[in-house]
Amino acid sequence: MALSTFFPAFTTLATLVIGVMWFLYDRRDRRICDRQRFRHAYRCIKCGRIYERRGQREVATCPDCGFANDRLRF
């Protein structure tokens, strides 16, 4: 293979590999971020425990005492 065709081919291939990896890792990070975004923290008024639940609920029951608590707002 001639040197004048090797460098452009290598550069194109390297750019393509980096672009594909960038796309795949971006999708993976977005999925992880979406999972974290739908987790909410709660503090039990009755027993004082801090816990978290997934989903978009405003009220969740405490796993220790069963009291219904509102979501914490930051």
Image: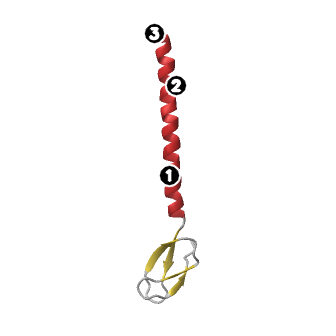
Q: Amino acid at mark 2?
A: Thr
Observer-nearest of 73 and 4? 4
**Where the N terminus falls, by quadrant?**
top left
Of callouts 1 and 2, the N-terminal one: 2
Dot 3 crowding, Cα within 10 Å, few <14, some 14–19, many 20+ = few
Which quarter of the picture shows residue 55?
A: bottom right
Q: Secondary structure at mark 3?
A: loop
Residue type for callout 3: Ala
Q: Residue furthest front?
A: 1
- Cα distance, mark 3 to mark 1? 40 Å
Q: Please report the residue visible at 50 percent of the width from the left and 78 percent of the height from the top.
A: 42
Q: Are marks 1 and 2 in contact (CB under 8 Å)?
A: no
Query: What residue lies at 52% left-to-right and 58% top-to-bottom?
Result: 33
Dot label at residue 59: none
| Above or below: residue 32 compared with residue 60 | above
Q: Which residue is mark 2?
A: 12
User: What is the x, y in percent for residue 31?
Assistant: 51, 55
Give the percent coordinates (x, y) of residue 72. 54, 76
Q: How many marks?
A: 3
Q: Marks 2 and 3, Cα distance to the nearest angstrom?
A: 16 Å
Q: Quadrant of the C terminus?
A: bottom right
**Under tag 2, what secondary structure?**
helix
The residue at which mark 1 appears reads as 29
State which tag comes first along the sequence, 3 or 1. Answer: 3
Residue at (41, 85) in percent of width and height: 64
Reading the image, the residue beneath label 3 is 2
Residue 72 left/right relative to 63: right
